[in-house]
Image: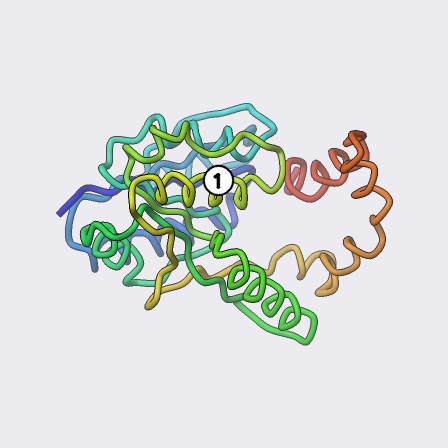
Amino acid sequence: MKSISVIIPAHNEEKYVARCIRSVKAAAKHYGSEVEIIVVCNRCTDRTAEIAGKQGAKVIFNGDRCIAKVRNAGIFNANGDIIVTIDCDNRMTRGTLKEIAYLLSTGEYIGGGAPIRFERYSFPLHLNDLLCRVSFAVTGLYCGIFWAERSTFQAIGGFVEKKAMEDAATAKLLKAYGKRKGKKYTVLRKNLLINSTRKYDDMGDWLYLKLMLCNIGTFIKAALGDSSGLDKMLDKLFYDYNG
């Protein structure tokens, strides 16, 4: 059985880091082999590193304002044969690591993602869920939890270092690399990512739908080469969220 490294990027996540690590530990116990947990503390000013360390995670530090670079810092410090990434406010289900290791052991798959389910639901969150499912089904670029062999991530250079949409870009890169190797990019069948709703709790369940409607001009400008407005929005939503 191959060893696994789970990478958890974290920016001021003292409220969620222990919960995420516990979900990984439960999956590790079910897997039954060596699992390394790496928390990448990104510009943290709270107790994230302290709590992660007490939970038994390896803690490293990173100052980039780019989630892809944060994940890559963890990947390139990992020792496991298999790399799995999960965001700090989310959780994995009990059989996740065991299913990942099995799918990779078949030799059919280069890697993949995971189905996403919100930890609570409302009408707008059902709409968001539907949009995610449709986009994943149409593109085949499943995200959420990313997983592949460490050698695969090394071969593609890690996550595509974009400030946003790095997940889709990385999935596309993994899919293309897999095709050259005669392998498929896939999604977990029996396990899933439990997606946090904390931003919806803070800013309303219509958050992302409102953003898409109210920032059409910003997206158009970004498409034409002026990303300043988009960068400010991304900083507010991701890189400066939690302080």
Number of callouts in the render? 1
The structure residue drawn at horizontal position 29% and vertical position 51%, both measured from the top left corner, is 109
Q: Please, what is the three-letter code of the amino acid marked with disc 1?
A: Thr
Q: Please give the name of the residue rendered at 29% of the width and 46% of the height, measured from the top-left corner.
A: 182
Percent coordinates x, y for residue 190 in the rendering: 32, 68
Q: In front: 159, or 24?
A: 159
Q: Is residue 142 left or right of residue 12?
A: left
Q: In front: 179, or 115?
A: 179
Q: Quadrant of the C terminus?
A: top right
Answer with left or right where residue 151 lies relative to residue 64.
left
Badge 1 element: helix
Q: Which residue lies under the disc numbered 1?
A: 170
Left or right of 45? Residue 189 is left
Q: Residue at x 70, y 57 (%)?
A: 202
In the image, residue 91 lies at what x, y percent? 43, 57
Q: Residue furthest left?
A: 1
Q: Looking at the picture, how far across and down is residue 56, in whole percent?
A: 29, 40
Residue 107: x and y, percent?
21, 50
Asked whether residue 160 is in view, the answer is: yes
Direction from residue 141 to residue 234 in the image, left or right? right
